[in-house]
Image: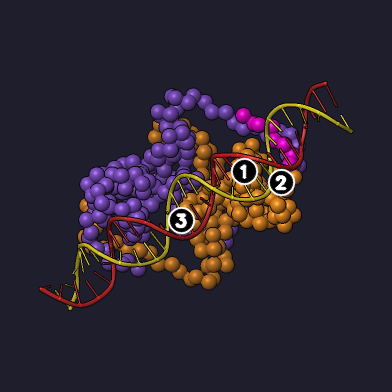
Chain colours: A purple, B orange, C yellow, D red
DNA sequence: TTCCTTAATAGTAACTATTATCATTTATAA
DNA sequence: TTATAAATGATAATAGTTACTATTAAGGAA
């Protein structure tokens, strides 16, 4: 299943730069970073390599709900927290929870192969700026009786 | 925060049809369904209403990792399981886990406001068709020492 | 009831993130 | 050193979603 990956300059640089970061950049952010050293690299090459590299298990592809795909130079399985205000993503180590989730092998007759847990909220910086956020409320014609 | 929603035929129909289903249709699938009764409705109207209705808490917007947005006529908070083969999404009731997750109010100095748990795997139908799936393996120049 | 204001609509264009295509270049095994 | 197939850069295409705009129609006030 593992195709033979050639060690191209572009590919090596993408892995190298990604491993330097502990942020979780998007394909486009990675493109901007590697372009500093390899100005002729194309965005398509970045996308293609991020895909191939994550398929091969060399990097991790993060598909967070409702947002753009991000990538992680760290392969170890961990959870993520996303700031709903500035969109940044941090790692969350919660071994206790990881163990509980991994023990769940079946739900509704599905054979479970992946468990994804993702928190979102306000990061320390945005928490100060934003104060509190208000909740929407239901009213009017739309209310219905029972679920 | 809750704007005054007018009771248009389009809006009422979208809510009504969505509440009939226990599948989790995409915007386009909802468009096809309501078009049967309101042939002149436009896709933009469907998108706009799904957005407004979920902001108002009348329906639920599901942003599953790596896939298209889906909608749920049920507002009650619950988890989902997605089939990696046919893409269909089912509900998962796991009150035990829900309680644990809700008790987590902070991670890495983030103030947690939402917890999303999402399983994926093979649904009963696809499990029979597909048998087992293979794992990718790492090899070659790319290996690096420690994380 | 009729009128008025403004939200909502249909139709369409635009946009964003991602994938595909293809002629050319280049890593690597023979 | 050369042959070959993987990878690249440039660009077009696609999918899903959002924005725009002239027109229609809720729903409160007169």
Do marks 2 and 3 share a chain?
no
Task: Specify few, some or many for label 1: CA neighbours under 10 Å numbering under 14, 14-19, or 20 or more.
Answer: few
- Residue B101 got which mark? none
Disc 3: which chain?
Answer: A
Q: CA distance from mark 1 to mark 2?
A: 11 Å
Determine if residue B143 is in view: no
| Residue assigned mark 1 | B48
Magenta stretch encompasses residue A78: no
Residue C30 image offset from top left, x and y in percent:
17, 78
User: Which residue is at the front of the view, A11 or B138?
Assistant: A11
Magenta stretch encompasses residue B7: yes
Kindly indicate whether the residue at mark 1 contacts the one at mark 3 (C-beta within 8 angstroms): no
First in residue order: circle 1 vs circle 2: 2
Task: Specify few, some or many for label 2: CA neighbours under 10 Å numbering under 14, 14-19, or 20 or more.
Answer: some
Kindly indicate whether the residue at mark 3 contacts the one at mark 2 (C-beta within 8 angstroms): no
Label 2: element kind: helix
Determine if residue A118 is in view: yes
| Residue assigned mark 2 | B10
Kindly indicate whether the residue at mark 2 contacts the one at mark 1 (C-beta within 8 angstroms): no
| Residue assigned mark 3 | A114
Q: Relative to residue B56, is residue C4 drawn left or right? A: right
Main SS, magenta region, reads loop
Q: Which residues are magenta?
A: B1-8
Q: Relative to residue A90, is residue B144 drawn left or right? A: left
Label 3: element kind: strand
- Residue in view at x 25 percent, y 55 percent: A10
């Amino acid at each position: 299943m593992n195709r033979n990956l050639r060690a191209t300059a572009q590919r090596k640089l993408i892995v190298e730069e990604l491993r330097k970061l502990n942020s979780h950049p998007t394909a486009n952010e990675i493109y901007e970073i590697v372009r500093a050293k390899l100005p002729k690299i194309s965005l398509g090459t970045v996308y293609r390599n991020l895909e191939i590299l994550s398929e091969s298990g060399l990097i991790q592809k993060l598909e967070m709900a409702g947002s753009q795909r991000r990538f992680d130079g760290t392969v170890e399985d961990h959870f993520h927290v996303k700031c709903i205000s500035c969109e940044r993503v941090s790692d969350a180590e919660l071994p206790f929870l990881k163990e509980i989730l991994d023990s769940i092998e079946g739900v509704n007759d599905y054979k479970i192969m992946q468990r994804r847990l993702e928190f979102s909220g306000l990061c320390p910086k945005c928490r100060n700026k934003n104060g509190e956020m208000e909740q929407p409320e239901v009213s009017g014609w739309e209310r219905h009786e029972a679920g």
